[in-house]
Image: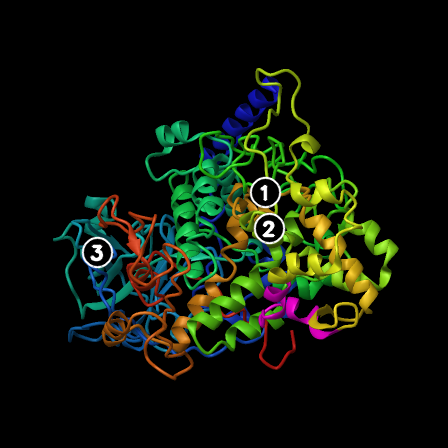
Amino acid sequence: MNTRAAAEDVRAYERESLILRRPAFDDAAEAPSHEDEDEDEWDEDSAPGSCWSRLSLLRAPLLAGIVLVASTQMGKGHHTGGELPMQAKSRHAFSSPLGASSGAGTAACELKLSNAYPPRQSTELYPWMHIAEPHRESTLRLSCGEGEGVSSADHKFTITCETRDGYNESVELLSGSTNFSPGDGVTYTFTRPGCLYTVEVEPVESEDAGAAKASSGNILGSSSGSSSGSVQAFEVACKYVRREIRQLTDADRETFLSALELAHRLDMGNGVERYGTKFKNYEYFTRKHLAQITLEGCTPYHGGDVFLTSHAAFVLEMEQSLQSIDPAIAMPYWDFTLDDAMHGTDWFNGTEIFRSGWFGRATEYDDGENNWITEGRFAYLPVPSNRSAPERNAYGRLTETFNTNPSRYLGRSPSVCGFPYEGQVRLPGCAAIRGARAASNLTEFHQRVEYGFHGLLHMFIGGVWDCGEFSVREEVERVPEAAHTLLGLTTITNNFWRAALGSGILVCPASCDSEGEGKGEADSFRDCQCSCPSLDARAPDYKTVDDAMVYVLLQPMIMQMALDPITMFSELVEEGWNDVSNATEYLFRGVDLDTTLRLRRFLLRLLCHPGKVAQFATPQAATNDPLFWVTHSTYLPLWDYMRATNSSFTSSGTKAIEEEGAGVVTGWAGKADAEAWFDDGACSGHNWDETLPFSGLWDGDAAGEMYTNQQLMQALHPANVANTYVYEDASFSHCTDDGRD
């Protein structure tokens, strides 16, 4: 164990060194410029992240977006960090220069801004015509008149940013001063995400320009150069651009993955010492996301509209942790709908995601002991341990209590108790996207995202193994006609185990010894496995348990399946007559009564003896797996799309929600101008005005002062200039509404 731990520490230092030697592949001065190219003319085969070109056939025209602006300020103590208020001007206000003064002989021109990446698809979604990515060199050129190309004159570019928390940035540059010929433009690296920069462009006399260059090294003071025409002003929003992970350049993807590895290997003390207080590691996020679900019986981050605000905050907090390592990193996302369209049921072998150099792979099909990731950068990632943590298993591992997996290292398997998902199921695809886009209000959208589009991934990717005699694979071999039903049941066994633990049917030991820690031999997994002692003692093989009792024990979970309108679970059961009990019950579809009774008994036995559950599959401990971040970023661009195209967040709407309280449902799609938030009261943190444990996400916000859901909804609005990111393609434009994917 000491040798492996030492090796992990060495590897962490190696990855850190690699980040600090980051190659400058995305230098705009060296890369071909794309600011004058239309999106349709961009050659994807030569684009950064060339593997994305193989997906180009799946793309469709971007759905038209109607940008409606957000006008509500942040609450007291949370001003969102920008110099301007949250309200964003319409992008149409930016289509011409701002405040161009009259002057001699210069027609109104357009600012062309570019970097090494091709033009964004979501240009119509966000209310800024010009977006510059922070800590990434941008090229600024002036284009005057159709067909005239760039201006041939020398120009002085004055770039300024001022924020209400006292930040002030101002620089003057002459065209031709930064790797370009005179008149071609300038290069500049914007550094303040969430700031609305002003770029003023003014023609200068060539003689004065030459003198200025000679005297100042092309970086001008306030008096350098003389005006020969009008000053034209443009607004540039400084925003990180979050892209699908396969769209990143090889260098940017390597930088992101290397930084993510550091966050999953370094302890908090070392990380904060090296990178500052914004650094957060895997143990911090695992403990935070776990919360105290067993003790409190609920989670502040799931099961309500809070799912959207909380997970957007989680992703932003990790993004900022990675930016403490390299400030140019933007959190990418994995669009698994593309893998569904390209690979069907062969997604596990077909996608790049599970390559050893990306997120690594465990066994394709295994019901063995560990299923560790043994190759690549994420091999032998540690599972954090803390016996004093409020939520942990009997071995002290930070995971859900029902998961008595003793492993110290992260494991995955796309299977549950021997039943493989590979070749059997497809990842959520465009049908799920269309369902979410059709949502008429925020709550319906949340349900379609959390339970339909997103939730299935946890079991598909994480898996469960070492189930002993309760093998789903063997049960399918015995009862092949029940294969479809068992497949559906495997995807929610994690919820069944949690529910059984909460009801008291399932009991888990408080403490077990994983390595002979002072009391002789270590406790084996079978010694420490959770069980249902009242049933096990009475009927070890469960054959003597009355069918009526089996149904009573399972009924709450089966009813939950039957009443779920969003996912496939409601398709597995139906109400029918049970000739044995002489009563109407929920029966499994597609099988006869005898098979239904058999499946119930098998399900109860499986429920009473959980196998080893992957951290990703629990799913409250999923933040321990690096895949959490790119899978929990996937639905956030869709949320941006829905908010920008369907609603604005107005002060009157906010006031109405505050006054009317719980259950305000006004709808989307033009039905009202305010997004509705449903106060379900199910758990602390779910209500509109309750706080979540996030603070300091935006510059200037009070340290330690936590955000409410209301404040997060406002700060995260896609029209908020102080928010720090946008998405390259927020609409999932390849998922057409007519079903042609």
- For this view, does 24 lie left or right of residue 509? left
Which kind of residue does numbered mark 2 sit on?
A: Ala
Distance in Å between CA atoms under marks 3 and 2: 59 Å
The quarter in which the N terminus is drawn is top right
Residue ID for mark 3: 160
- Amino acid type at circle 3 is Thr
Nearest to N terminus: mark 2 or mark 1: 1
Q: Please report the bounds of the magenta region as a residue range.
A: 558-577
In the image, residue 246 lies at what x, y percent? 58, 54
* In the foreground, 551 or 574: 551
Q: Residue at x 45, y 42 (%)?
A: 285
Disc 1 marks which residue?
402
Q: Is residue 45 visible?
A: no
Along the line of sight, the residue nearer the viewer: 246 or 349:
349
- The amino acid on which the numbered mark 1 sits, given as a three-letter code, is Phe
Q: Earlier in the sequence, mark 3 or mark 2?
A: 3
